[in-house]
Image (spheres, grey):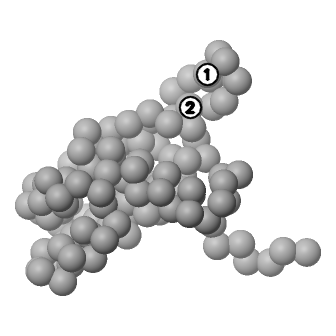
Amino acid sequence: MPHSIAYKRLSRTDGHRRSLLRNLATALFKHEKIETTSAKAKELSRVAERLITTALAGDLAARRRLAEYITEPAVVKKLVEQIAPALKGRTGGYTRITKTRVRSGDAAELSQIELLT
């Protein structure tokens, strides 16, 4: 019996899941809202909250930690210089997940995840 599962596996291997979440996080910070499946959106929300909390520090060490995870340097710059200062007054809850529709091909429940700025 599995106890205390820390995250959803999303039916992927560890490397594939990490790569998926890195790409989703980069797209979220680049476009400020994306549409994906509900399960992916929930996992992405956990990742994005942690990255924004790291970006709030704004120092060189924080930028380097963000650059390890986010795949585009321009997105790291946008996160630290634009997104994080706009969210500075909040004590968490930087993202909003809204269920949008059911995909017709496979009946997957889709959600829109957006940054609260």
Toward which corner of the image does residue 38 lie, by quadrant?
A: top right
Q: Position of residue 92 (x, y in %)?
A: 35, 66
Q: Residue furthest bottom?
A: 61
Q: Would you say 17 lies left or right of 55 here?
A: right
Quarter location, residue 57: bottom left
Position of residue 43 measured from the top left corner of the image (x, y, whole percent): 54, 56
Locate residue 103: give its quadrant.
top right
Is residue 34 shown left or right of residue 106?
Answer: left
* Amino acid type assigned to the residue bearing label 1 in the image: Arg
Indicate which disc residue 40 carries: none
Q: Using the rendered image of the protein, determine whether residue 24 is visible from the camera's viewpoint.
A: yes
Tell me which amino acid carries mark 2.
Leu
Circle 2 sits in a helix, a strand or a loop, which is it? strand
For residue 101, above or below residue 96: above
> Earlier along the polypeptide chain: callout 1 or callout 2?
1
Count residues near mark 2 (Cα–Cα under 10 Å), then give few for <14, some for 14-19, many for 20+.
some
Residue at image position (27%, 76%) is: 65
Helix, strand or loop at mark 1:
loop
> Split into 4 quadrants, where in the image is the N terminus?
bottom right
Determine the residue located farthest toward the right in the rendered image: 1
Residue at the disc numbered 2: 110
Residue name at image x 14 percent, y 64 percent:
80
Report the residue at 65% width, 16% height from top. 104
Count neighbours of disc 1 (C-alpha within 10 A) and say few if under 14, some if 14 to 19, many if 20 or more. Answer: few
Picture disc at residue 103: 1
- The answer to the question of whether label 1 and label 2 lie on touching residues, with beta carbons closer than 8 A, is yes
Measuring from the top left, give residue 108's x and y in whole percent.
66, 30
Instruction: Write the residue at 66% across / 54% down.
Output: 12
- Per the model, the C-alpha gap separating discs 1 and 2 is 7 Å
Q: Is residue 86 visible?
A: no
Left/right of residue 63 with respect to residue 45 in the rendered view: left
